[in-house]
Image: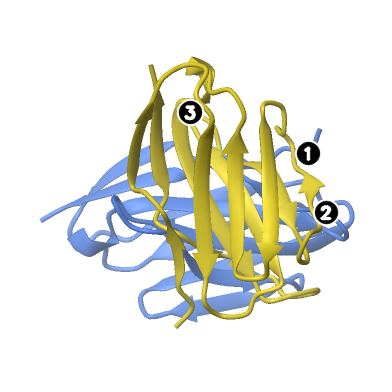
Chain colours: A blue, B yellow
Amino acid sequence: ILNVEQSPQSLHVQEGDSTNFTCSFPSSNFYALHWYRWETAKSPEALFVMTLNGDEKKKGRISATLNTKEGYSYLYIKGSQPEDSATYLCAFKQAGTALIFGKGTTLSVSS
Amino acid sequence: DVKVTQSSRYLVKRTGEKVFLECVQDMDHENMFWYRQDPGLGLRLIYFSYDVKMKEKGDIPEGYSVSREKKERFSLILESASTNQTSMYLCASSLGLGSLTQYFGPGTRLLVL
């Protein structure tokens, strides 16, 4: 059974802090790694889709890196803001399979 | 912008009732998905469809069925609702073969009494 692990499960930071989360996934038959942001009472929203080892993606203050050989991805948030409070989901895909989601990291940012 | 809508945000049903959850997408996407999300667990795939009238079982199809008669609409059916089907149900769609990003609806929180 394929497993996607996210850590930490939750964290609380102060406004202005930078933070990062980890997603671990099987390193075999890699096809893609997704990051989604899920705010309360809203739809999960795609942040990044990464397909190549060494990929780095950036969207504003949020960035992500990918290491397919060792099976991990990091999501970084620089200068956290209260509006960054959400659950961040990563999802892993092998060729020919459906997405497998991790349990998510719930971020709370206090002003 | 892609829009995925779900028929209800909240639903309360009784054990044994037949329940229909509807999902509609407006971007001509080929693939549609139904997930459920429970506390402490990741999103789990129930069923997906890659074309009209086609369906594939996901990881947890037991107790559910689906229908896709039109490209834009994908229905999840609970033939006889049970309390262990109380959950948040999310619908998603994606463009087609090779397309990776999934676009999600807002979710339906179902309570089965």
Q: Quadrant of the N terminus of chain A?
A: top right
Q: Amino acid at mark 2?
A: Thr
Query: Residue A6, image x and y in percent?
Result: 55, 42
Residue for point 80% across, 73% down: B97
Q: Position of residue B108 (x, y in %)?
A: 41, 45
- Judged left or right of residue B11, residue B30 is right
Q: From mark 1 to mark 2, how far is it between C-alphas? A: 11 Å
Write down the residue under mark 1: A2
Q: Are marks 3 and 1 in contact (CB under 8 Å)?
A: no
SS category of the residue bearing label 1: loop
Tell me if mark 2 has few (under 14), some (14-19) or many (20+) residues whose alpha carbon lies within 10 angstroms of its own.
few
The residue wearing badge 3 is B40
**Which quarter of the image is occupied by the C terminus of chain A?**
bottom left
Viewer-side label of 1, 2: 2
Q: Position of residue B48 (x, y in %)?
A: 72, 52
Residue A31: x and y in percent read: 81, 64
Calculate the distance from the C-alpha at mark 3 to the C-alpha at mark 1. 17 Å
Residue A38: quarter of image: bottom left
* Identity of the residue furthest to the bottom in this view: B1
Q: Given contact means CB atoms under 8 Å apart, are the residues at marks 1 and 2 in contact?
A: yes
Q: Are marks 3 and 2 on the same chain?
A: no
Pick whichever, A30 or A8, lies toward us.
Answer: A30
Q: Amino acid at mark 3?
A: Gly
The answer to whether residue B52 is seen in the rendering is: yes
Q: Which chain hosts label 2?
A: A
Label 1, residues with CA under 10 Å away: few <14, some 14-19, many ≥20? few
Chain for numbered disc 3: B
Q: Are marks 1 and 2 on the same chain?
A: yes
**Residue denoted by label 2:** A97
